[in-house]
Image (cartoon, rainbow, N blue to C red):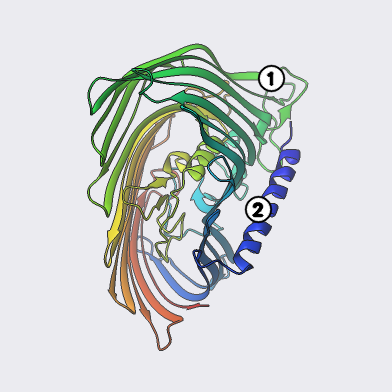
């Protein structure tokens, strides 16, 4: 099955929503509307030096971008997008184009009943997690990948008497340009990624405690994904019922039971008469549609769990559940606490069978209603802070590191935990996101050159953070930091580590629309035998921005 037809429909839907957004932005705004559109142009001069081998990279960057939001009674949209073209000063390096940003929109078609949602993402990441993230992060680095994603779909949310009724459908698309990483020596060809189309539908009906001494919910969901690479398919469906029994004003017991069926498969690969896999000129495995499809995951049966919900105050909530799913024990939970009206903490423990495409869509759909745009000249990333987007409301945000841990087309069971702190008051704004993820890959045993993904486990730990302070009406400072650790039980794969910190200073020059800035950063990585062992890179830049 190809993704062309769904992609065409998705493109039309996104184009239609864009036209609608443009019409609302350009139309006369009512007095209650909030509109803030700020397109800008920048020019930068950047110098990076590898302190280990004295290599120096110099480039000039021309930048065009837009930060904006529109809010009316029935329509909300926000975008932070940046296009950067780098002119390399070294003849051995290529010029580079970088697209980064996020956008989201919601149209209330029928208030308190039907809304239409859309979102989009553009980001630069690494394909193999062993490679460095920063430093000489150019298109000439074969480990650099461009990730593009978008989704559209309706949401139904209403009350019918005492019943709460909800449903949603999301059509999503994910595309990765890995610059032909599959053709790089030492990189498993089947570890590459092209594009996928995801269909995700959910529906539920329920009633809170009141008329009955307990609350109840019946829900169902379905997800289908088509991945171009080796014609992979993923199908999952579930139906379940849950009850919530209050035992005090602050504590409730909860339990649920249901049925789930998940299947994933792919095409077998083309082999020569000696059984050796055939590799395309681009370094990719070639599917063989004449052979039976290979089943990569097949699990169906009862799912169940039980736990507690604790709400000691309006500011705090803890949920924890233990049960049976995916053929074994599963533990999930969440914790939310508002420290005050400006700062908050959110944490969760998760367990699922998923894919890179599905995780990316889930995170993109989970963007906070109003997100902060934090400037980071060295790594525009997603929302300005590597893999995290922080919301204006304390404790809100989402980190994409569980998806971007490694970009490949395989299915996997992923278990992990995240914690996020964010907020701001007066001149201060800050955010910190940390996460641990473990992937166990679910692939057929296609051993190639002694390497197979099947049942391999990856472990990663990441931290992304920023702090910003306005020094005056015309100046501000920003500090950004990150650290990342990755390990795998695959034979011959070393653990890797990376960390970095950067600081920047911004000041308005002469006129309100013109801003100058300077930044310095230090980045280090130890990627074992993958791409040069140990590296420490120092970078500095100066730039000018004109905001229209």
Q: Quadrant of residue 65?
A: bottom right
Q: Position of residue 280 (x, y in %)?
A: 71, 38
User: Along the line of sight, which residue is nearer the eye, 137 or 245?
Assistant: 245
Residue pictured at 26% horizontal, 53% vertical: 341
Q: Quadrant of residue 508?
A: bottom left
Mark 1 Cα shell of 10 Å, populated few (<14), some (14-19), many (≥20): some
Q: Position of residue 495 (x, y in %)?
A: 36, 38
From the viewer's perspective, tell me whether residue 415 is left or right of residue 343.
right
- Position above or below: 436 against 21: above
Helix, strand or loop for disc 2:
helix
Q: Which quadrant, please, contains the N terminus?
A: top right
User: Along the line of sight, which residue is nearer the eye, 500 or 276?
Assistant: 500
Helix, strand or loop for disc 1:
loop
Residue pictured at 40% horizontal, 50% vertical: 388
From the viewer's perspective, tell me whether residue 152 is left or right of residue 400.
right
The residue identified by callout 1 is 293
The residue identified by callout 2 is 17
Residue pictured at 51% horizontal, 68% vertical: 31
């Amino acid at each position: 099955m190809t993704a062309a037809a769904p992609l065409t429909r998705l493109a039309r839907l996104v184009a239609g929503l864009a036209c609608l957004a443009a019409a609302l932005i350009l139309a006369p705004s009512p007095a209650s509307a909030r509109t803030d559109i700020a397109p800008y142009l920048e020019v930068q001069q950047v110098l990076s030096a590898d302190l280990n081998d004295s290599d120096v990279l110099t480039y000039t960057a021309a930048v065009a971008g837009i930060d904006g939001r529109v809010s009316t009674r029935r329509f909300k949209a926000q975008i932070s997008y940046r296009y950067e073209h780098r002119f390399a000063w070294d003849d051995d390096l290529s010029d580079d184009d970088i697209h980064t940003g996020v956008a989201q929109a919601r149209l209330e078609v029928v208030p308190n009943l039907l809304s239409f949602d859309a979102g989009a993402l553009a980001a630069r990441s690494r394909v193999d997690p062993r490679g460095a993230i920063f430093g000489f992060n150019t298109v000439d680095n074969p480990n650099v990948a461009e990730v593009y994603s978008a989704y559209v779909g309706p949401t139904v949310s209403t009350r019918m008497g005492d019943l709460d009724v909800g449903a949603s459908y999301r059509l999503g698309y994910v595309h990765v340009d890995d610059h032909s990483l599959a053709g790089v020596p030492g990189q498993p060809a089947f570890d590459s990624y092209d594009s996928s189309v995801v269909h995700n539908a959910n529906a539920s009906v329920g009633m809170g405690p009141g008329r009955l001494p307990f609350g109840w919910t019946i829900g169902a969901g379905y997800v289908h994904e088509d991945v171009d690479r080796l014609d992979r398919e993923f199908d999952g469906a579930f139906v379940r019922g849950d009850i919530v029994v209050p035992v005090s004003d602050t504590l409730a017991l909860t339990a649920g039971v249901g049925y789930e069926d998940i299947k994933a498969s792919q095409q077998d690969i083309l082999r020569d008469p000696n059984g050796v896999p055939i590799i395309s000129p681009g370094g990719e495995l070639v599917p063989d549609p004449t052979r039976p499809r290979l089943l990569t995951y097949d699990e169906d049966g009862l799912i169940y769990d039980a736990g507690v919900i604790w709400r000691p105050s309006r500011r705090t909530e803890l949920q924890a559940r233990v049960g049976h799913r995916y053929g074994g024990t599963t533990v999930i939970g969440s914790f939310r606490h508002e420290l005050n009206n400006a700062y908050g903490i959110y944490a969760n423990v998760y367990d699922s069978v998923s894919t890179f495409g599905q995780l990316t869509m889930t995170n993109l759909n989970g963007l906070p209603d109003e997100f902060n745009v934090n400037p980071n000249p060295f790594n525009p990333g997603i929302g300005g802070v590597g893999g995290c987007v922080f919301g204006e409301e304390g404790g809100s945000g989402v980190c994409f590191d569980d998806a971007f841990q490694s970009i490949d087309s395989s299915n996997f069971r992923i278990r992990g935990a995240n914690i996020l702190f964010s907020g701001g008051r007066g001149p201060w704004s800050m955010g910190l996101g940390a996460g641990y993820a473990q992937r166990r890959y679910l692939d057929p045993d296609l051993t190639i050159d002694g390497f197979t993904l099947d049942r391999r486990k990856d472990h990663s730990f990441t931290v992304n953070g920023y702090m910003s302070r306005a020094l005056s009406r015309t100046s501000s400072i920003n500090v950004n930091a990150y650290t990342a650790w990755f390990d795998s039980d695959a034979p011959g794969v070393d653990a890797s580590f990376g960390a970095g910190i950067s600081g920047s200073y911004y000041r308005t020059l002469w006129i309100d629309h013109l801003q100058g800035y300077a930044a310095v950063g230090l980045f280090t990585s130890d990627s074992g035998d993958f791409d040069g062992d140990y590296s420490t890179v120092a970078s500095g830049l100066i730039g000018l921005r004109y905001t229209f």
